[in-house]
Amino acid sequence: MDYQLIVIGGGPAGLAAAHSAWENGLTKILIVERDKHLGGILNQCIHNGFGLHHFGEELSGPEYADRFIKFVEETGVDVMTDTMVLDITADHEIYVSNKEGYRMISAEAIVLAMGCRERTRDSVGIAGSRPAGVYTAGTAQLLMNIMGLSVGKRVVVRGTGDIGLIMARRMKLEGAEVLACIGASDHPDGLARNVNQCLKDYDIPLLLRHTVTEIRGKDRVEQVVAMEVDEHRNVIPGTEIVFDCDTLLLSIGLIPENELSIKAGVPLDSRTSGAVVYENNETMVPGIFACGNVLQVHDLVDFVTEESIRAGKSAAEFVLGGAKAGTDDGTKAGVKACDGADSGEVLDMAAGENVKYTVPMKVRKDNVGKTLEVSFRVKKIFGENSVVTVMQGDRQIARFKRPYMSSSKMEKVKVPLKLLQDVKAEDGPVTISAVEA
């Protein structure tokens, strides 16, 4: 083997996973990054708000990335930038291409940390012509923050996720007029703090229960048409609103970059579009782990870091066999089997009432440490006295109170191992549900 561990992706997930694996005993680690620099998407996120959970202070995206880049530079981790991974096998071989040519590199384990990409206008079927001036929010961010280019003067933003909200403010700061930030839900999809700091503080109109239905213009965008939608998100005739603008920014969701995962034979979850993983972030292919936005789309980079630290530690434990790596943070060391044959009973996790998905999707009971951490997203807003229940059939395993929950924010519960001792796989999946108390 060329390496003990290969990490595909040098963004926040890959950096944290590689550093964690090094701290937990691995000495031959390689990070492969397709960009010319480490840091990933954080390099273009010049706004602050990163690091409050992990570092206890407010950082910009580049500052947050720089912290982990320096962590990795203090280790013996090898880095290949400006290198594209073209293929990957279940035998932990990757095929890369860069200025030095085409080659194969092998490892005992692999961490998938490729991140995600943005949905385009074709994803939501916006009709009309194809003029200049239509950008995904991330592309506009790259053009403005990295390349120093102006994007537009009269702007409509479709989508109320965090990237859309932040870019609406960014356009305003650059002197553009932001006519509206449009979302199809009855509530914004971004974090409450971004709604306040990006829209309300800058008097940017928020138009909910609407969607963009048409783009008009020849050489450049001239008009954008929006229409009201019903509870099923079908447009309501006669509700057209025409915006005279030169730019449309699209912030309509993110898709995990799992093309390489598919090539390695990693099964994907239809709800997250990420890999099906066990309690320690191992996929269904032995020795291949996944973390960050390639596994599930996160709202905070701090949570990406937390998840990736666990994935790096788990990869180190896989490589080192029975040797314990680090402290017990929820998983045990030395588990190499993924089919449950050598690791005891395997429980299936499932999304219950008002929950979109769960991560992990499968749990090897014998590989759970003190607690089992499950992350999930709810389908709607829950106010005071909401409750998260962990059930198997009609049996309640655990119950957690929540003061507030929203689809814009990832939720987590930690189930003590002792509550899972009597749970049997033959009795059906363990479900996570969200209900009003």
Image (spheres, helix red, strand yellow):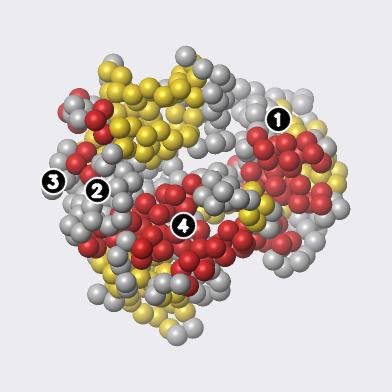
The residue to which callout 4 is attached is 13
Looking at the image, can residue 225 be seen?
no
Measured in 3D between alpha carbons, the distance from the residue under mark 1 to the one under mark 4, in whole angstroms, is 33 Å
Which kind of residue does numbered mark 1 sit on? Answer: Leu
129 to the left or right of 262: right
Residue 267 screen position, x and y as percent = 32, 49
Q: Nearer the viewer, mark 1 or mark 2?
A: 2
Distance between the Cα atoms at labels 3 and 4? 30 Å
Marks 1/4 in contact by CB < 8 Å: the verdict is: no
Helix, strand or loop under label 2: loop
The quarter in which the N terminus is drawn is bottom left
Question: Of the residues shown, which amino acid type is indicated by label 2?
Answer: Lys
Between disc 1 and disc 4, the foreground one is: 4
Q: Position of residue 427 (x, y in %)?
A: 20, 25
Q: Residues within 10 Å of mark 2 (few under 14, many from 20)?
A: many
* Amino acid on which the number 4 mark rests in the picture: Ala
What is the secondary structure assignment of the residue under circle 3?
Answer: loop
Q: Earlier in the sequence, mark 2 or mark 3?
A: 2
How many marks are shown on the rendered structure? 4
Left or right of 142? Residue 267 is left
Name the image quarter holding residue 209: top right
Asked whether the viewer can see residue 347, the reply is: yes
User: Which of the two residues, 312 or 290, is positioned nearer the viewer here?
Assistant: 312
- The label nearer to you, 3 versus 4, is 4
Q: Which mark is residue 208?
A: 1
